[in-house]
Amino acid sequence: MSKGFRYGIEFRYPVAEVHATLTDPRYWKVRLGELYSSADIEVGDGSISVSVAEDLDSSALPGLVSKLAPDRLGVERADRWGPLAGGRADGSVTGTAHGLPIRIEANLELAESAQSHAVLNVVGSAEVKIPVLGGQIEKLVKKMVEDLLHRDRDAVEAFLADQRDFDQRDSEQVD
């Protein structure tokens, strides 16, 4: 049985700027760091699909998960963003673990908030197929997803702040 989740993540930037960042391969290069070279990235007209896999040291995972996981846990994440239309964009994110029967799926909607900033609405589920302990692990996974979404937001905002600083320095040099 999977556990559903629903989150709303607010940004400090307008939806068009956040979407432009999420569909920019330069953002993903910064966000993924060393993993960028092995990522599968497909860019379309205002859209992007990003798939990345990595091995995690299971000792860094929450206690219950680390006890059940192999020493190295393979994790795959796939993000997809469609084009911005009418002030909103749809996307999705999926995550799977190899070594534990864990699957995460979420539908994403990037839209404009009442304050003219972007808001990311996330509706998804986490499923862990482990008898007896699956429900407990699903709760941990839901918390990990929420933390990841906040880190993603922080990364987008840092990228946008850096871009604005660069643009400002560039325009000052021209003047």
Image: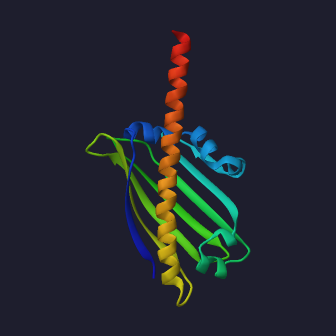
Would you say residue 64 is visible in this rendering? yes
Q: Residue furthest left?
A: 114
In the rendered view, would you say 50 is above or below 25? below
In the rendered view, would you say 39 is above or below 136? above
Q: Is residue 124 left or right of residue 36?
A: left
Task: Give the percent coordinates (x, y) of residue 90.
Answer: 41, 51
Would you say residue 45 is visible in this rendering? no
Task: Give the percent coordinates (x, y) of residue 86.
Answer: 32, 41
Q: Residue furthest top?
A: 175
Q: Residue furthest right?
A: 71
The quarter of the displayed image where residue 112 is located: top left
The quarter of the displayed image where residue 6 is located: bottom left
Task: Give the percent coordinates (x, y) of residue 106.
Answer: 45, 63
- Viewer-nearest residue: 143 or 132: 143
Color scheme of the displayed model:
rainbow
- Residue at x-position 48% and y-position 57%: 149
Q: Is residue 125 left or right of residue 39?
A: left
- Residue at x-position 47% and y-position 70%: 142
Number of callouts in the render?
0
Q: Residue furthest bottom?
A: 132
Task: Give the percent coordinates (x, y) of residue 35.
Answer: 69, 51
- Viewer-nearest residue: 58 or 89: 58
In the rendered view, would you say 101 is above or below 60? below
- Viewer-nearest residue: 49 or 159: 159
- Residue at x-position 48% and y-position 83%: 135
- Residue at x-position 52% and y-position 28%: 165
